[in-house]
Image (cartoon, rainbow, N blue to C red):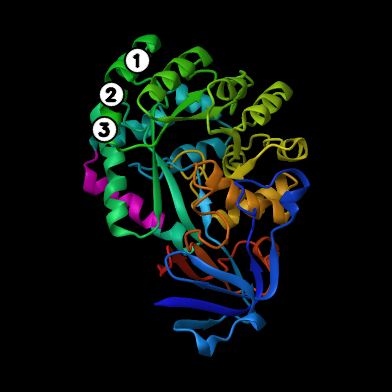
């Protein structure tokens, strides 16, 4: 049966008129309808003023949302929610002044999680991931991307990605899988980075493609990890198997990874704390989405990405949690919006567009979800606040009252 939400105090559509992005000044227009209504089943059937529809004349479950805000579900386009082990002790050391790079050089960081993942079976990984995803849903997320990258062997990478299949069976939100074999160089390839790159290209990518467990291939292009040349080799090889490119770019140092991401036609380049002017221009021209992860800059006490310069330049800017056990253990997109507004000088409206429509664009899903438009999937969240501005104004709380994914109430 269809559902009608009516008498909505603030109906935020993020309507892009069929487009996949709202850039520049248009990011400040979230398509708000005051005293609105929305009718949906699996997809959205009608949107407008509550006065334009007679609830008694249609066969639908009716929800009175007076005093509430209704928005698209959040699209979290960059996470690492499938992992094992804890790195809280590393977090405590960083608070005492030890750098992320120092901890990594000692065998911590990604390699610490790698050891735990290699020892974990699939049920263990699922037991850790499922509560995180469920919590994300309860905070309004209806689409989530999850990367591998914590096993760094073919078997353990496939095991991480297999967890997504179980999550799809358990939870009715949308999951997107990304292969991140190039997250770090594993110990068995210490001093032989190029050999590990060859292993990814010749052995891992064919199996990942054969198993159809990922839609994207990601690389960590930065000092101490993979060079731009390594990354481009991997991403161009991945493209031959139908895997679209994503890049962890210019997070720790300015290495020109944003330019490389644009050059290979990556759908998104993420982090970008040290992006150059040339990188911004290249990404804009290529249409590569800039996915910003303020939770990571916050956790690592790093400078934030230059969101204001990117938006003013007309780039497509998205926000995501980067939920992971080391550098940002947060699955709450509402908190990410708050960080973006307070520390990256984004407006509340810009943070909403970046967390919904542009998150979908970073996954190639903006024609399907990310905004409330007729024909799109009914990924809808009711927030128990009278205005969308309160999502950032009243920070540190969960404003969600109800979550619908594909028209089904899930939280």
| Residue at numbered disc 2 | 206
Tell me if residue 130 is in the magenta stretch: yes
- Inter-mark Cα distance, 1 to 3: 15 Å
Residue count near mark 2 (Cα–Cα under 10 Å), binned few <14, some 14–19, many ≥20: some
- Inter-mark Cα distance, 3 to 2: 15 Å
| Residue at numbered disc 3 | 156
| Residue at numbered disc 1 | 196
Q: Quadrant of the C terminus?
A: bottom left
* Nearest to the observer: residue 280 or residue 190: 280
Give yes or no for contact between labels 1 and 3 (Cβ–Cβ under 8 Å).
no
Give percent across and percent down for residue 269: 56, 31
Q: Which residues are magenta?
A: 120-133
Q: Is residue 401 above or below residue 31?
A: below
Give percent across and percent down for residue 216: 42, 34
Front position among marks 3 and 2: 2
Q: Is residue 302 above or below residue 399?
A: above
What residue is rendered at 72% in x and 50% in y? 27
């Amino acid at each position: 049966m269809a559902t009608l939400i009516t008498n909505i105090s603030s109906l935020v559509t993020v309507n892009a008129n069929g487009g996949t992005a709202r850039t520049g000044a248009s990011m400040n227009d979230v398509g708000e309808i005051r005293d609105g209504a929305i009718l949906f089943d699996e997809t959205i059937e009608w949107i407008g003023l509550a006065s334009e529809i007679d609830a008694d004349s249609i066969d639908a479950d009716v929800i009175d949302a007076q005093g509430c805000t209704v928005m698209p579900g959040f699209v979290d386009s960059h996470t690492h929610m499938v992992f094992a082990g804890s790195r809280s002790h590393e977090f405590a050391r960083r608070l005492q002044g030890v750098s992320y790079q120092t901890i990594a050089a000692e065998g911590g960081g990604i390699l610490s999680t790698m050891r735990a993942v290699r020892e974990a079976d699939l049920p263990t990984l699922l037991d850790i991931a499922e509560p995180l995803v469920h919590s994300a849903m309860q905070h309004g997320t209806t689409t989530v991307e999850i990367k591998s990258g914590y096993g760094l062997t073919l078997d353990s990478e496939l095991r991480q990605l297999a967890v997504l299949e179980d999550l799809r069976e358990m939870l009715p939100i949308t999951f997107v899988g990304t292969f991140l074999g190039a997250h770090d160089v594993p110990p068995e390839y210490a001093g032989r980075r190029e050999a590990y790159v060859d292993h990814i290209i010749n052995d891992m990518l064919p199996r990942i493609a054969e198993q159809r467990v990922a839609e994207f291939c990601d690389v960590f292009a930065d000092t101490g990890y993979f060079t731009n040349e390594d990354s481009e080799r991997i991403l161009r090889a991945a493209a031959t198997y139908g895997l679209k490119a994503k890049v962890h770019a210019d997070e720790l140092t300015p290495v020109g990874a944003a330019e490389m991401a644009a050059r290979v036609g990556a759908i998104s380049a993420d982090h970008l704390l040290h992006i150059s002017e040339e990188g911004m221009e290249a990404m804009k021209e290529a249409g590569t989405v800039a996915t910003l992860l303020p939770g990571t800059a916050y956790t690592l006490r790093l400078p934030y990405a230059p969101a204001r310069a990117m938006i003013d330049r007309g780039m497509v800017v998205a926000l995501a949690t980067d939920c992971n056990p080391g550098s940002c253990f947060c699955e709450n997109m509402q908190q990410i919006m708050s960080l973006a507004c307070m520390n990256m000088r984004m407006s509340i409206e810009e943070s909403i567009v970046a967390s919904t429509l542009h998150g979908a664009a970073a996954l190639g899903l903006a024609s399907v979800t990310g905004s409330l438009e007729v024909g799109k999937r009914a990924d809808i969240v009711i927030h128990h606040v009278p205005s969308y501005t309160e999502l950032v104004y009243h920070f540190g709380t969960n404003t969600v009252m109800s979550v619908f994914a594909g028209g089904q109430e899930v939280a």
